[in-house]
Image (cartoon, grey):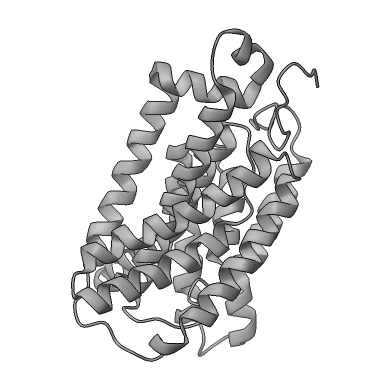
Amino acid sequence: MEAWIWSATLRALAFGTPILLAGLGEIYAERSGVVNLGVEGMMALGALAAFAAAQLSGEPFLGVLAGTAAAAAAALVFALTSITLRANQYVAGLALTMLGIGLAGLLGKPYEGTPLANTLPESWFIVAALLLASILWFFLQHTYWGLLLRSCGENPETADAMGINVYAVRYSAVIFGGVMAGLAGAFLSLAYRPSWADGITSGLGWIAVALAIFSAWHPLKAVAAAFLFGALYHLSYRLQAYVSPEFLKAMPYLFVVVVLSLSALRRGPSGAPEALGTPYVRGERR
């Protein structure tokens, strides 16, 4: 029994790691006032770039760098569209998801079914995710730069009046979110299932977006939430002999819907940044 519990815990940690990594990046971006619904697309691009680079070079660490760089480049395009051009953030994010998934599926066809020779241990990513959650919490809550970022998400007009470059802060936050999504994708293709397959992200990017809301934009709460989702994923495989596989596969997503619905009904302040999703125009009052 103890061995089963230990094994289930380890698998929950592994399942939850990509959700946590991508979710932390989304929390960081949203605390600056920008909603990026393109996490799924950035994860797919990151997973493909990481696998392709690792396969061609034989060095999985180069794969990690390539995965984070590819997702960061996609995030930069989103930032240009939503921050500089002030396009609707939700529409731009959805477009990024569709573009990222489609592009990764098209470019990844030569790598379908090819196993990766040199892989990375899952434990490295798990430890990195936990450390990053702690660092990000400390940065946001206990540093001057974290205060600047949060002020851009709460009241960008006041932040601008204080001499803070709101655009630069939001750009950096969105790109960091892309790096984290790319790291999550690299985990999937280099460690979790060291291969490439179209649809490798399996909707985890959407759960990462929901994680930001479920955790009330708090990095440490995101740790518990991510591994709860990871436990649900693991449970969906364990119970396939007793419950309909279709229902079990949908269970983590159904749980997300239930959680977000309950969050919407919750009274009192939600913890969301005041200017979340609102493009900032210098000199223009909201």
* Residue 129 point in image, percent of width and height: 34, 50
Foreground residue among 194 and 44 = 44
User: Taking the image as drawn, is residue 280 in sight?
Assistant: yes
Q: Residue at x 41, y 16 (%)?
A: 144
Q: Is the residue 276 above or below the residue 184 in the image? A: above
Q: Is residue 214 left or right of residue 115?
A: right
The number of discs equals 0
Q: Residue at x 58, y 86 (%)?
A: 245
Image-based side of 14 in relation to 123, left or right:
right
Residue lying at the far top in this picture: please name it.
162
Residue at image coords 47%, 73%: 235
| Residue 131 image offset from top left, x and y in percent | 29, 43
Left/right placement of residue 136 relative to residue 252 reads left
Q: Horizontal and vertical percent for residue 271?
A: 63, 30
Q: Is residue 20 in view from this perspective?
A: no
Within the image, what quadrant is residue 217 found in?
top right
